[in-house]
Amino acid sequence: MEIGDRHRTGLGGTVRVSRVSFLAPYLIACLAVTIIPVIAAAEEAPLRPPGDDPPVASAPAVSPAEPAQSDKPLWHYGGFIDLGYSLNFNFPANHFFRDRSTTPKVNELNLNMLAGYVRKDATESSRWGTELLVQTGEDSKAFGFAVGLPKVQDSDVWRHFGRANVSYLAPVGNGLTVQAGLFNSFIGYESLYAKDNGNYTRAWIADYSPYLMFGVNAVYTFNDQWTGAFFIINDYFHLENSNSVPSYGGQVQYKPTSAWTIKETIYYGPDQSNTAVEFWRFFSDSIVEWKGERVTVGIDYQVGTQKNASALGNPRDFYTGATLETRWQISGPWAVSIRPEFYWDRNGLMTGSEQFIKAITTTGEYRIPYKWTNTICRLEYRYDDSTGPGGGFFKGTNNVLTPGQQMLIFSVIGTFDSP
């Protein structure tokens, strides 16, 4: 993905509105709330054996925190390092995986992510919660931006935050959780962090939907089957600065059985300099997941549209894509994940090029757990095919565009997580 300090001019003119005043209070509050108590908490909390690993390739949870158990620590801390080498058989001279914000470099060893975090759970016995995650690496450079839209001021600083929020579990019915700051996105099946996904490289719809959101959200669990959420955020991508008008969205989650999860998330808001309602973007994200004892299958379908305020006649831009996420825990530490997908950017709104992309990714995985650590070794084969007026991937010494691209990816991820 080509990201620069660009400004998009529409009917309302060029916008250079700074959002640093909107971002800074939440981040400063999160830093204070997180760092000061954690020193004392770390001294008081006894060391405990590690808990279960987080679920792999699962959509973001929207359920409020459960009541704390007497022997369960409220504070958690840890970190991870992600190293990857993508062997691109096109051998582009510029070493770029075209139109990507994650794993953007090829044919060289890269530190794709290095991060550390601290988190306090919000529970019935301790209702305030907080998260802080700081990060660096190739995957942290362009994930929160939009093509052709200006950035927030000091975006090169804000991109180093992967979480920075405070939350409160209100004593309302089954529990109403309110969260403010920078939090995990309600949109999408895959995480920004490869360690949490079945495949190492992310899907196209993942790179072109928000991994994080900045604003306020509220989540309420009605019963064991139904959960609802509502959010108000600054923009579709949290580091874009298209205007100063907030965007809105909501999610409904339904679990007919313990194995099935169905989610529908809607986003509606302005992502152009002209903020008239007729130019607002409508976006839908539909997820269905079945999780068995060893096999997980998920389908994620996304569609977005908006009228182009800066083009003659205001034509309607449209994009859509889908993935089929499958993971098989073969035996013990061995697992394999296969993901076919497509992405159609009809007008070049998201990728900057009019193209239709088809891809398939197969990943073999071996995990080595030791106490509070996990070492994840992956070998992945990926094939992408992009057609259309702006389609293609870089190839050769002149970086010419060719429709197809084959890659073999080697990666090692090391994680450390307290109970």
Image: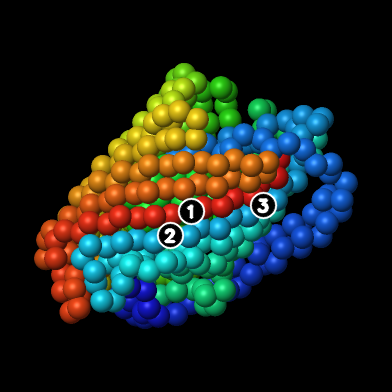
* Residue 331 picture quarter: top left
Label 2, label 3: how far apart the Cα atoms are: 21 Å
Q: First in sequence, mark 3 or 1: give its number.
A: 3
Residue at left offset 26%, top offset 42%: 340
Residue at left offset 56%, top offset 39%: 54
Q: Is residue 343 left or right of residue 255?
A: left
Whether 180 is drawn above or below 322: the answer is: below
Residue at left offset 73%, top offset 30%: 67
Q: Quick one: label 1, few (<14), some, or many (20+) residues within 10 Å?
A: some
Q: Quick one: label 2, few (<14), some, or many (20+) residues within 10 Å?
A: many
Amino acid type of disc 1? Answer: Val
Frontmost residue, 418 versus 391:
418
Whether 18 is drawn above or below 216: the answer is: below
Label 3, label 1: how far apart the Cα atoms are: 17 Å
The residue wearing badge 2 is: 84
Circles 2 and 3: CB atoms closer than 8 Å: no
Frontmost residue, 387 versus 409:
409
Q: Position of residue 33 (x, y in %)?
A: 76, 58
The residue wearing badge 3 is: 78
Nearest-to-viewer mark from 2 and 3: 2
Q: How is the image coloured?
A: rainbow
Q: Is residue 267 left or right of residue 127?
A: left
Q: Position of residue 302 (x, y in %)?
A: 31, 45
Label for residue 412?
A: 1
* Residue 271 appears in the rendering: no
Whether 257 is drawn above or below 227: the answer is: above
Residue at left offset 48%, top offset 53%: 412
Amino acid type of disc 3? Answer: Gly
Amino acid type of disc 2? Answer: Gly
